[in-house]
Image (tube, rainbow, N blue to C red):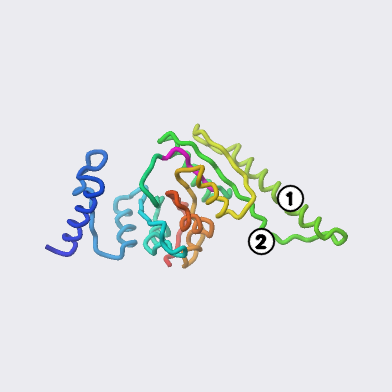
Amino acid sequence: EGLVQRAWRSTVRQTQSVLGSTLPGGLHVEDAVLVRAGRPADVVLAEARRQDADIIVLGYTVDRPRLDFGSTARRVIAGARHGVWVQKHVPAAIERILVPVDLSEDSLLALGTACALARTIGARVEALHAFSSTGFIVSTWPDYPDMGSFVAIDELRDGDRKQFEEVMATFDWLGVEHTTQFVDGEPTQVILDAESRADLIVLGTHGRGRIASALLGSVAWGVLRRARLPVLAIRHPEREFLGD
């Protein structure tokens, strides 16, 4: 008996000890378990391509060092053609879906995916937009040094809110019950603060680079690493990421 066959038998036994011998839909564990030799992320991505899978589901333990997200998870999310679902605890009913929206194509694609999922399972959707003034450099009025910054940031916030409301007003929600929220604050923290209102986070990934945070986009990277809810990461079909 070869190493792969022994690994398969061990995996089947472990799976049966948790899920039983038969999976939902009547599929037997023996028929569902595949074992392949190779680098985990490469094996997962190759099998997903072979099956033309619509989604890859990964388990992940949240109680890891804060800076760690697991090399396999990072590589799979960066290389997956479609969505990757990161499950961080025992599965539970999904009734509320939180979608961070920064008005990019990636985030609107994620919102559309969330609505399609919500319509299928009877969930509702919250679109959350965070306005952060960090990084803005504004000029001040010479006679009123504090007033210039206040007015400029206020105008930026109003413009951002107006754009968000206009896009949300014309978005195709597919008939799904939904709410929209505009919040001041650093985006990653705003999203994490909203976890208590949701059962699932759906977000778009974007960016290019050879390190995980660049591959995923800094906000997506922060949410994937720190959120305690399951996260569905949606890759834009036209993005081509570089491996780290």
Q: Is residue 96 magenta?
A: yes
Q: CA distance from mark 1 to mark 2?
A: 15 Å
Query: Which residue appears at 48% of the width and 56% of the height?
Result: 226
Residues tagged 1 and 2 counted as in contact (Cβ below 8 A): no
> Does the segment drawn in magenta span residue 176?
no
Per the image, label 1 sits on a secondary structure element best described as helix
Disc 2, SS? loop
Q: Callout 1, which amino acid?
A: Asp
Looking at the image, can residue 113 be seen?
Answer: no
* Observer-nearest of 92 and 30: 92
108 displayed left or right of 71:
right
Q: Earlier in the sequence, mark 1 or mark 2?
A: 2
Q: Is residue 203 left or right of residue 34?
A: right
Place of residue 149 in the rendered image (x, y in percent of width and height, measured from the top left): 77, 57
Range of the magenta residues? 94-100
Residue 179, percent across and down? 56, 37
The disc labelled 2 sits on which kind of residue?
Answer: Gly
Point out residue 70 in the picture as x, y percentages from the top left corner: 39, 62
* 123 shown above or below 57: above
Residue sticking out furthest to the top: 175
In the orientation shown, which residue stands out farthest toward the left? Answer: 1
225 up-or-down from 210: above or below: above
Pick whichever, 146 or 213, lies toward us: 146
Q: Which mark is residue 135?
A: 2
**Which quadrant, please, contains the C terminus?**
bottom left
Type of secondary structure dominating the magenta stretch: strand
Q: Identify the residue at horizontal 46%, vertical 55% (top origin).
A: 224
Q: Is residue 219 above or below residue 91?
A: below
The residue identified by callout 1 is 154
Q: Could you say which disc has been placed on residue 28 in the image?
A: none
